[in-house]
Amino acid sequence: MKKSLRMFLTLALLMCLAGCGAPRAPQEAEEGLLLGFAQIGSESSWRIGNTKSIQDAAERHGIRLMMADANQKQENEIRALRSFIAYRVDVLAFVPIVEEGWENVLREAKAAGIPVILSDRMISGEIDESLYDVYVGADFLEEGKKAGSYLLRKREELGAGRLRIAEISGTPDSTPALERAAGFRSVIREDARFEIIDSMSGDFLRSKGKECMQQMLARHGRDIDVLYSHNDGMTLGAIEAIEEAGLVPGRDIVIITVDGEQAAVDLLREGKINCVVECTPMLGETVMELAEKLKAGETVPRILHPEETMFTEYDSLEAIAPRGY
Ligand code: AHR
């Protein structure tokens, strides 16, 4: 079958099978590396920035990109990956929405001889490591530890008694939710005054972040000293709820967030957020470099973490460059 016809049919198949946003058509040239990338959706500004970073980098590298949007459903992602395998892409990349459930499709990729890049999120450590080539993304455990270390620094200002923490976590069973929670706890356990009095999943969505905060305020009233939220989107929703309850974010409730979107950095400058742990979505360049190396049969590292930082109320904030997401 002519390659262009095959590509058209595959795209049609992807749209039918994935039951999700139409995959972006590969760029026009039929020569060169073909990368199948399954994205989980567009739940946050962070995610939108991540998708753009992948698309822009593919264009810079002249890599043909087949991109599927799984609309937050693992089954859509798996269907998209199977379609990419059927189309015989050169390299597969995907963002595992949760850690479990990838083994079968990864075995199919391995049987087809297609190298695999895990982008942004990891899969379960239980899985046979030969089923993927490289993970590129944040060290989420470290992010949680940074959030905890900020709180240790803040504690003297918070008084001598119990320090009650409310947590809004990300998508259950996803690497960032699991590890941001674990890293944070590993640090705050140093001080017995810290107590996580409530923890709810806001699925990384602004709307759910607001709902979680409303429910926690209804349960605990003014007895929340600290909010630890696993992403900026949920934090922005939570801040709306806090203000609607007549409280002052950043003062009545200390706010710690993760991502570093422009909106969060702006609120840090206004004093409504106290600490922003950076998680960069700008992974596109590294993903494309890895795809080229894998196609060329070169060895690549198993894990690549981008450099990330943290911005807090104790830092000078003028110098923070525009975030780009
Ligand atoms: O996997 C990274 C997380 O996913 C980001 O923190 C969040 O904003 C996104 O939805």
Image: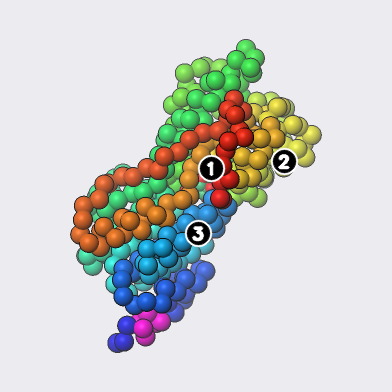
What residue is shown with label 2? 241
SS category of the residue bearing label 3 = helix
Seen at 65% across and 25% down, the residue is 225
> Which of the 4 image quarters holds residue 263?
top right
Q: Position of residue 108 (x, y in %)?
A: 27, 64
Please tell me which residue lies in front, 93 or 98.
93
> Which of the 4 image quarters holds residue 214?
top right
What residue is shown with label 3? 52
Amino acid type, mark 1: Asp
Principal SS element in the magenta part?
helix
Amino acid type, mark 3: Lys
Seen at 60% across and 29% down, the residue is 316
Q: Can residue 104 be seen in this view?
A: no
Disc nearest the viewer among 2 and 1: 1
Crowding at dot 1, Cα within 10 Å, few <14 / some 14-19 / many 20+, comes out as: many
In the shown orientation, is residue 41 left or right of residue 291? right
Give, as a single range, the part of the protein colored magenta: 4-9
| The CB of the residue at mark 1 lies under 8 Å from ligand 1 | yes
